Image (tube, grey):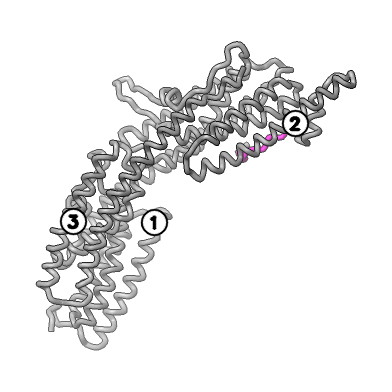
Amino acid sequence: MSSNFVNEELFTKFQEYFDHEQELRDNVRQITRQIELASKKADTKLQLIHSSVDKERIASVCAEVRRDYFTECVEGFKNLAEIIPPGQFYRYNDHWNFTTQKLIFIIGLTVYLETDGDLVTREQAAETLGLKCSQAEGFHLDIEDYLLGILQMASELTRFATNSVTLGDYNRALKISKFLADLNSGFRCLNLKNDAIRKRYDGLKYEIKKIEGIRYDISIRGLIPANGNEN
Amino acid sequence: MSTEELLKEFGKYAKELDTKHDRYERIIKISRDVTIESKRIIFLLHTIDPNKNNFEKVLNEAKDRLNKVCLTSFKSIAKELSDLDQYQYLKAFAPGLQEFIESYTYYEYCSSASNPENGQQMCSWEDLQKKLTYESEEGKKTYVLVEPLEFILGVGDLTGELMRKCINSLGSGDVSSSFNIANSLKSFYTCYKGLNVHNRELGRKIQTLRNSLLKTDNVSYNIKIRSEEAVKLGKTFDPREVLEEINAPKDEHVDEGFF
């Protein structure tokens, strides 16, 4: 009687379902690796900012990063968007969310350097990667990935401020200090749960403390340029 | 970008995050209701007792309550998820869904066992998906995703209930039920063993299933030994002796709480 109850076929079907999913995941991993490689290269290029204040060189690095690496990422995300079935973004996104965050950090830094102090908005960042802004439109830039990427950028900027001082560009350090303060008030608008963003945001407070220390160091020695101009 | 513009941008982000968190919390709350009601339905189904001949009454009540869960709680979840990526909120409703699958398939088992000639096979996730798909008057379709992995995990929990039923049946003297359940568990174990799927939660469930299986194997063994012995001694076989032998109190009902 009820031994017929067990539906063995169901398990065979489930195995097929699972195998199919694994296959897709393998493909996703392959594409993600390419994007990751491009982001790594871009990150390495941008290390220049820590050892040079030459504006032209920095500008040319930014252009290079955009041309060589961001375009490659756009290609990668396009490929991902093609293989992820609609409505299943969040089934697979743990394969690429860290990479996306890192890219947001790199894009954020590039935009900051190019515009001399602007924060990349989510829309701009999404556009740079060829992504949509909202879930309804399809393959998109998740809001949390964006925010986490911005927080990563904040710690890089603190380092940038330290090294700018070393290289004698005090004005730069002051600008970064103002930027991080603005960013901090931005993040304060968010009602954070006890999640990854909260953890990274707690880190931002230390970055701000550190940069206030830098400010203090240069102002007590009378190194603050008059009217925000160098010299 | 000025400070004001930046704050305006972040205001937008805050709104989006809040919407997401709020929805997540609401779904968790509904999912909890589903869990509680499912556990109660399972408890109800455990009150089936051939000595009281209450099959029909209990099964009907369980069926009504299961349907009600589909038409209230799950419908609300479906409404929350309408047009959204179900996987984004899967973690919020998976616990309730699993518990519901457990109670639903347990209902199916009891129903199938009460009808020896015409025993039904358990449903598939597609069958259940149909039950959790809704259409509004305007023809708009909403649903709660019955993710196959969650279904397989829910059925894993079912095996625990079957083990309990197997032991309880002994207490009410229903030896053939115990035997049948023990056999079903063997089939389930074979199916689960055959899966080549790496998932931590599934691994745990299979381990639990193995422990249940050891208990029911032991029950079958003792029934056999005791009944043979009774025949030899010219006594009538009382399955309750087996209960004493395997040292499991009749009313043992260990569950994860909630009652």
Residue placed under numbered mark 1 in the picture? A196
Reply yes or no: does residue B74 show up in magenta.
no
Query: What segment is highlighted magenta in the picture?
Result: B251-258
Assess disc 1: are there few (<14), some (14-19) or many (≥20) residues with their C-alpha within 10 Å of its C-alpha: few
Q: In this picture, is B6 found above or below B252?
A: below
Question: In terms of depth relative to the viewer, which is nearer, A217 or B179?
Answer: B179
Residue B58: image location, x then y, percent: 62, 19
Pick the quarter of the image with the C terminus of chain B: top right
Q: Residue at x 81, y 33 (%)?
A: B244
Mark in front: 3 vs 2: 3
Q: Nearer the viewer, residue B103 or A64?
A: A64
Chain letter of mark 1 equals A
CB-based contact (under 8 Å), mark 2 and mark 1: no
Q: In the drawing, what numbered circle is on residue B250?
A: 2
Q: Above or below — where is B209 with respect to A51?
A: above
- Can see residue B99? no
Kindly report the secondary structure that dominates the magenta region of the rendered protein: loop
| Chain letter belonging to callout 3 | A
Disc 1 residue type (three-letter): Ala
Q: Quadrant of residue B252?
A: top right
